[in-house]
Amino acid sequence: MPDITRLILFLFCLTAFAESRKPKRRRWTGQLEMAKPSHLCKKNLDVTKIRKGKPQPLLRVEDHDFSMRPAFGGPAIPVGVDVQVESLDSISEVDMDFTMTLYLRHYWKDERLAFPSTSNKSMTFDGRLVKKIWVPDIFFVHSKRSFTHDTTTDNIMLRVYPDGHVLYSMRITVTAMCNMDFSHFPLDSQTCSLELESYAYTDEDLMLYWKNGDESLNADEKISLSQFLIQKVHTASRLAFYSSTGWYNRLYINFTLRRHIFFFLLQTYFPATLMVMLSWVSFWIDRRAVPARVSLGITTVLTMSTIITGVNASMPRVSYIKAVDIYLWVSFVFVFLSVLEYAAVNYLTTGEEQRERKREKFPCMCGMLHSRTLMLDGSYSESEANSLAGYPRSHILTEEERQDKIAVHLALSSESNSSRRKGLLKGQMGLRIFQNTHAIDKYSRLIFPASYIFFNLIYWSVFS
């Protein structure tokens, strides 16, 4: 009995001790719980952290139908545009197009995207939000190829302001058609245009305009091209009409380009001029050096043909004559005429040499008749006198008649001899000219250079 009493007393004391310790532990735990919120209040709140309960989106995209344009059924929505040209990559004369990279920016207001904000700061998004809202459907007229850059991600930016204003920017590379006129090539200037237009919305639904006029187009000052100098960059706008759909606003970016001539001077004009001058060297070569003059003429003709073929290979097949064609073909004609000049000289020289060979083969016997018929003492035979007077031996004349006939025959013979001597003197003078330098070569040395210089003066004064 005493043992049971002692056990009950021990348990009662243990229970009382335990109850006395519980309030102290609760108060200590409470102090820790009060210190924890004060420490967390010092940290910045992360608004992107998922909280318990239903989230409240900043942009209520799901609450609106963005398949319709803003203010549908009302006036046309104004969409401002500006362009930052990053580079003008290439211009192709063969394909008649140009390639450029630019930043295309759109500005409009969509009240469905307005959100409350005490700081009036905008929110910036990437391309994922673009697929959920309405954006202008701008496309490039007469474009052949175009794409939006996607390295390392899609180069698209969307910035939304609290009042609903939107900035939509993208980085695009586009290859567009450029109608070129090569009538003055390579001394020409070309104007290429990049045209922007809404594909679906007419001017009654969407009003497309340059946001800041001519200042809406900005180009990098470091832009340079190998063959062109950018003279002027300006904007324009007008309406375009389609018979089946109506009127559309169209914006233009116009580039005026001036071609650099120095490359073509080195590659085309200087070689052609040198070939023409080289063809004139044959005028100073001996006319009897047939292989030298013929090979020189053929070489210059073939070289000019190669230059003409090379220039036309890098150009489109147009149906009109270009300025470079005029220069090259006139130079080709000069080279070809130098070959024809030697052909004429060789032909005349060959004919003269053949006539000289005939004179050497059949010498003139007119002077030998007088020495053979007349003797040293003045006597002559009857048969010789009759033949000299033009009568046969059977015909006998008196002495006086024979004397008269012989005198007449000798006078006629002396006149014919003098005329032949004059002809021989003229032939000898012509022979000297052919032996030294032909007269055609002498005239060609002056006429060919003077004519080519005159042509160059006219050419560069007209096309420069």
Image (spheres, grey):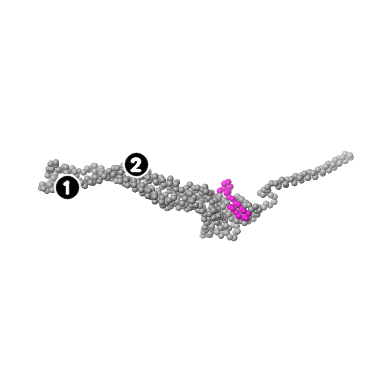
Depicted 448 relative to depicted 208: above or below: above
Most foreground residue, 258 or 16: 258
Q: Tell me the magenta residue range.
A: 144-168
**Label 1: which residue?**
411
* Amino acid type, mark 2: Ala
The mark that comes first in sequence, 2 or 1, is 2
**Can you tell which of label 2 and label 1 is closer to the viewer?**
1
**Label 2: which residue?**
292
Residue at the location (47% across, 48% down)? 227
Query: Is 155 on the left-hand or right-hand side of 15?
Result: left
Residue 153 image position (x, y, % from top left): 58, 47
Q: Secondary structure at mark 2?
A: helix
Residue at the location (49% across, 50% down)? 230
Queried whether the magenta region covers residue 157, the answer comes back as: yes
Residue at the location (14% across, 48% down)? 405
* Amino acid type, mark 1: Ala
